[in-house]
Amino acid sequence: MEKGIAFPLVSVIIPAYNVEKYISNTIQSVIKQTYSNIEVIIVNDGSTDNTKQIIENDYKSNAFVKLIDQPNLGASAARNAGYKIANGEFIKFLDGDDLINAKMIAHQVSLTKSDSCIISSKWGRFYNNDIATFKFSPEECWQTMSSVQWICSSWKNAQSMTNPGIFLIPRQLIGKVGLWDEKLCLFDDTEYFTRTILAANEVIFSDSSTLYYRSGNQSLSSQLSNAHAQSAYYAVLKSTQYLISTKDNMRTRLLSANCLQQLIYYFYPEYPELCSLLKKEIKDLGGSNIEWASSKKGKFLSKFIGWKLAKKITKWLR
């Protein structure tokens, strides 16, 4: 495609921390887009491996690739640093180990119709650095919807997927809602995209666009530190507040309560104080009806001894 008014510049911002095994594939998936009016901004976030060297050696002669080097400040700070030097009319935040299909940006740009619309895409997971393991993860929100409808649909099972690479965002909308919250280290994408989507009029679905999400096998609860737990609590709580302040009804209250209840299932029993705070928020919203999602063994045990004891036992048996 030729550059010009009909082909606005798209800035792809990639935070990179210790992704030496994956960063070249991620960059290549952007460089090989069928849409040519792209700048790639990679923010090396204090990597201690060869991430920076790989970028410098392989892409220093590419005029469309820019490298920012900073101390390890976290992914949100890296995205903000990239945005501050970006020139694009549209922004895509892409994690340093994920991939996008070659037609993604062209198709997403073709669907843009105003600065108050966000373009979304399909996505799926692949494992062990093997793209052959890729499978789509269909969601009800894979359709064009109003912003509130999209959030409600995405939160239906209290397992919202807001991986940054899914979305193409108008620069003017980012100017309206602000940048990433650098205090957050977990569920920062949930907070950012809930805030950003609710500020838009519509989320337009691109069925020709796919994000390939590199996934591991560890559960969230097995990785939780105190900082992660505090971040998750704040991010999800703020997200529910954004939704309620935009649309306050029985449906949005129940969806918000279910998202908070899901955090309790993650946090228990390691973070009792956060669980107590969440219980109060859930009560104020009118209660939750989402059940503990566990293995067949865990669900069977919970019928007789309750989910709390069942979780302790299944965790001990691992």
Image: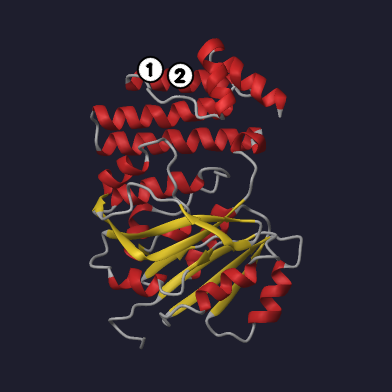
Q: Nearer the viewer, residue 265 or 94?
A: 265
Q: Quadrant of residue 72?
A: bottom right
Q: Residue at x 36, y 19 (%)?
A: 287
For the residues bearing labels 1 and 2, Cβ distance under 8 angstroms: yes
- The front one of 185 and 265 is 265
Task: Name the amino acid type tagged 1.
Answer: Lys
* Mark 1 neighbour density, 10 Å: few (under 14) some (14–19) many (20 or more): few
Q: Quadrant of residue 261?
A: top left
* Residue 221 versus residue 39 in the image, above or below: above
Q: Residue 159: image x %, image y %?
A: 44, 39
**Position of the C terminus by quadrant:** top right
The three-letter amino acid code for the residue at tag 2 is Lys
| Residue 307 in view | no
- Residue displayed at 37% across by 75% down: 106
Q: Secondary structure at mark 1?
A: helix
Across and down, in percent, residue 316 comes to 71, 23
Which residue is label 1 attached to? 283
In this rendering, position of residue 287 left or right of residue 314: left
Can you give x and y, in whole percent of width and height, for residue 199 in the image?
29, 50
In the image, 63 versus 314, the foreground residue is 314
User: At which x and y percent is residue 30?
Assistant: 51, 74
**Cα distance between the residues tagged 1 and 2:** 6 Å
The residue that label 2 is drawn on is: 279
